[in-house]
Amino acid sequence: MLYVLQGPDAGQAIELTNASVLLGRHSQQAPLTDYTVSRRHAELTCEGDDWTINHLGSSNGTYVNGERISEPTLLLHGDQIKIGGTLLAFRGQQGVHGFGGPQTAENMVRFSGEGDAIDSSLLSAIQSSEESVIVAAPENAAAVRSWNVMYQLAEAAGVIASEREFLDRITDILLRSLIVDRLFILLRKGVGAELEPVVVRYRSKAGRKHEQIKTSSAIIQQVIDTKAGVLCANANADERFVTDPNTASLESLALRSVICVPLTGHDEVIGVIHIDCPMGRHTYSHDHLRLATAIGRVCGLAIENQRLTEARMRNARLAATGETVAYLSHHIRNLLQGLRSGADIVDMGLNREDSEKIRTGWRIVEHNLDRVFNLTTNMLTFSKDRAPKIELAQINNVIEDAVDLAKRHAEERGVMLLADLDDVPAIPTDVEGIHQVVFNLILNATDACPPDTGRVLVKSRYDSEANVVSIRITDNGPGIDTDDVKGVFEPFHSSKGQGGTGLGLAAAKKIVDELQGEIRVKTAKDKGTRFEVRLSVMRSGATDLDKTHPTAR
């Protein structure tokens, strides 16, 4: 049986009843009205169950599946014959495939199973390998379109946000680039998982009730097993093929042109793209198959790379979380041990009614309570985004309060803590945030100083030319190693060993950044370290309060 797919006689069915059938304008069995077809263009001959086609010398040539023939060629079920401007499909003897497809959650795609009447014939196949994604140089319009498709695909892969969004964009590209009636994409959600429909699209208008897409699971399985894209003719097997071939239309016979290609990652098939179209409207060629296979290869690699990236990020987050928990747990345990030691001394003093021992134990408890408070404050500051509460404030008052609060810690270490405050203007700032910054920097400087001979100097200065107020905290400690300077503001980076959390400087920098300020560090070996916080008198995006009191003193 021959079906005319394209040309002036489209829709006609030609029954092959004789052992020899002439194709041409003067044929009695298969008369064609296409003037690009010769009077005696080609001839079909039958030997047993096999049909062959022979070109009879027409200058327009005879093509089978896009290849020009020059000698008798055996026809297979689903082969496409092109003579002049007429395209025909050959239907030979072909059994019905039955294959148990994977279970799916979607109900819009159904694979043929035992007893289903779906008939498929493989016309062409292309391996999904590195070589297959190379598209020929743009020598004609079709090749140029293919290059444009690959360019769009590369753009989509470069800005992939989520897997589903990427698949939707790829579907849009396919629908714009190829004549597609129906499309679905199957995907494995994980290693060893079954293929599941994740995208199902129809070209027809939205709102129309669509029927379930039925396809041969044998096609899907072949694509998975061979990792090759295939071009098929696929028809619902029906008695109309043989009972009334002269009146059956191509639409009623549901003969479809099908392309099915794998989504191939680096090693395994992670999914399948399946597109089809009624052969009465359009038939896919080997070039279409090559383009679709290239798309499948690039998409498979993009999806696999995104999954690998997400897995690495997830593992990195888990590793960072584990490291943070371990680090903080160790430090908190040290604080609790300090509290327990102080509490034991207080208990001993109570039992002995020794007030001096009670005071000693209580100082230890108080010191560790301060450390607990500072730790939790820095943890909250560093881990939580906060909007600074801006108000006009005298920065010297904030510095004096931080110095007074840090004096007890300095005295315990035998460190001299001094303040040298210049006459600076009131500035719009976050008082609570700057207090935490100055206090953290003073504690950090005090801990860096040598016991009993240490000295920390806190200065405030106003640069009228730059319109900037600066706060400088300088110590006479050993300085910071050159290799460590770049990491001083990183969380959990501490040179104090068991004595520091590594959060104080990180929290200070975060607060200064939120205030659109700048924090600098200058250090020299055996000559100490100076931290400088620089804040603008007029903040960018200043509030009405800032504009009303620009330089109040």
Image (spheres, rainbow, N blue to C red):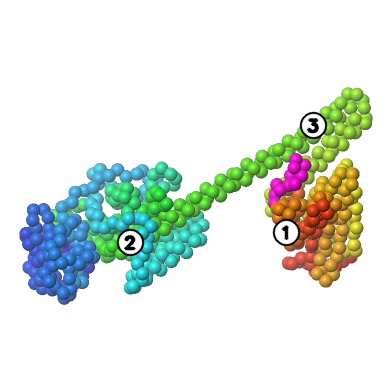
Residues at discs 1 and 3 in contact (Cβ within 8 Å): no
Q: Which residues are magenta?
A: 488-501
Image side of residue 318 versus residue 182, left or right: right
The chief SS type of the magenta part is loop
Q: Residue at x 59, y 44 (%)?
A: 318
Q: Residue at x 8, y 56 (%)?
A: 47
Q: Which of the numbered marks, if any, corresponds to residue 290?
A: 2
Between label 1 and label 2, give the one nearer the viewer.
Answer: 2
Q: Amino acid at mark 2?
A: Arg
**Residue 242 or residue 453, whichever sits in front:** 453
Decide: few, some or many residues near mark 3? Use Cα within 10 Å; few <14, some 14-19, many ≥20.
some
Identify the secondary structure beneath mark 3: helix
Q: Position of residue 36 (x, y in %)?
A: 17, 75
Identify the secondary structure beneath mark 2: helix
Is residue 541 shown above or below 432? below
Image side of residue 49 versus residue 426, left or right: left
| Residue, disc 3 | 340
Q: Earlier along the polypeptide chain: callout 3 or callout 2? A: 2
Decide: few, some or many residues near mark 1? Use Cα within 10 Å; few <14, some 14-19, many ≥20.
few
On the question of residue 174 being in view, the answer is yes
Q: Position of residue 532 (x, y in %)?
A: 80, 59
Q: Earlier along the polypeptide chain: callout 1 or callout 2? A: 2
| Residue, disc 1 | 513
